[in-house]
Image (tube, rainbow, N blue to C red):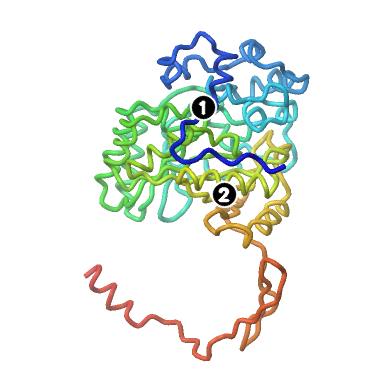
Amino acid sequence: MLPPPPPSKGAPVRPASEAGRRSLFPDATDAEWSDWRWHQRHAVRNLAQLEKYVSLTPDERAGVQETSELFRIGISPYYLSLIDRDHPFCPIRMQSIPVRAEARIRPGELEDPLGEDKTRPEEAIVHKYPDRVLFLALDTCSVYCRHCTRRRITKGGEAELTKEQMRRGLEYIRNHPEVRDVLISGGDPFLLSEERLEALLAPLHEIPHVEMVRIGTRVPVCLPMRVTDSLARLLRRYAPVYVVTHFNHPKEVTPEAREACERLVDHGVPVENQAVLMRQLNSDARIIRELSHALLRIRVRPYYLHQMDVAQGCEHLRTPISKGMEILQQLRGHTTGLAVPHLAVDLPGGGGKVTLQPDYVLERGEHETVFRNYKGERYLYPEPEQTDCSCPYDSVWQARRWG
């Protein structure tokens, strides 16, 4: 039997969180449920609170207890309302409730898997790539994902940057004219007040060599009511600002999440998605394809599919590299190219990102290259006789542009 078609565009859609809200938070008023700060105040943060809402498995209960000193719990009421309380492999549940395996550190796992701390000249700045920096704005999240690669930062404190740390971070960027791209992350920058966020965006916008700002956030996924018209207008004011969000499963693409993402896009703020490939959660080409299609329907571009980083406590969620390659193989040619994300591996210890794809080249020769297509059929591509690829006009263009 075919699944029912998605609701038609413009048709009224029942909020995905409605049933969970009525069951778990029956006393929450409409005004409270639509207030992101209410969700922050009522987030589930310990075992006693969690057991009020979810019948934990023995593995989950042990996971909460054994990881309590390693990495904190925090689940917004909205995200909690999406959990399937009858199935421990619910993707929302797997991302927000720890299991016992998370307390074990396996060989090869690293506290700082991306090697950020060794390229951190200021508390707020990671400068690993030549033309871009990471600006760590805070250590707080609306939901603490169990696959978090930056848990050494987000595991405690709940502190925003001090004014001095922010000043030093901005000064670093001013003094490094090679920096054209700033990624604001943390923690989740959308948990900053609009005043605090503008205090960061405004001075960045004034730095001549900063050409663009990206903001990494899970708020559209885990706390979509935070994305207000006021926030969207603020981001548009300092364009170009790109929002990079983090949907991992089509179950997260709810009507509420759609409203948040489309509000940003409608205000002129592009939104892209970086998913993480996780074993038994989304490690299937059908799931990734459905996720990509759901994102494109709400005008979010599937950008990266990340191989999970070797962060401590995450080995049980990691997939073999071959699984990501297999998924790309099953997507390429079977759906639009816009729905095929880049498969990215962030090399352990600070090597940076590399992207992978199936090898479609069978043979290389002087006069032709032999390819296979997505069906496995052989095709010849004739190589040109002329091979000089220099660009004679480039010196003229550069002289006019920079002269």
Q: Residue at x 43, y 15 (%)?
A: 32
Residue under pointer 1: 14
Q: Residue at x 63, y 47 (%)?
A: 288
Q: Residue furthest top?
A: 27
Between 98 and 310, the residue placed more toward the observer is 98
- Circle 1 packing at 10 Å, graded few (<14), some (14-19), many (20+), is few
Residue 256: give x, y in percent of width and height: 48, 30
Residue 257: give x, y in percent of width and height: 48, 33
Quick one: quadrant of the C terminus? bottom left
Residue under pointer 2: 350
- Please tell me how many numbered marks the rendered image carries: 2
Residue 375: give x, y in percent of width and height: 70, 67
Q: Mark 1 is on which residue type?
A: Arg
Q: Residue at x 45, y 82 (%)?
A: 389
Q: Mark 2 is on which residue type?
A: Gly
Q: Residue at x 65, y 20 (%)?
A: 68
Choose top left, top right, bottom left or bottom right for residue 21: top right
Instruction: Tell me: residue 59, above or below residue 208.
Output: above
Between 87 and 102, the residue placed more toward the observer is 87
Q: Looking at the image, tell me whether mark 1 or mark 2 is earlier in sequence order.
A: 1
Q: Residue furthest bottom?
A: 385
- Circle 2 packing at 10 Å, graded few (<14), some (14-19), many (20+), is some
Rounded to the nearest angstrom, the CA distance separating label 1 from label 2 is 44 Å
Quick one: quadrant of the N terminus? top right
Instruction: Tell me: residue 368, above or below residue 92.
Output: below
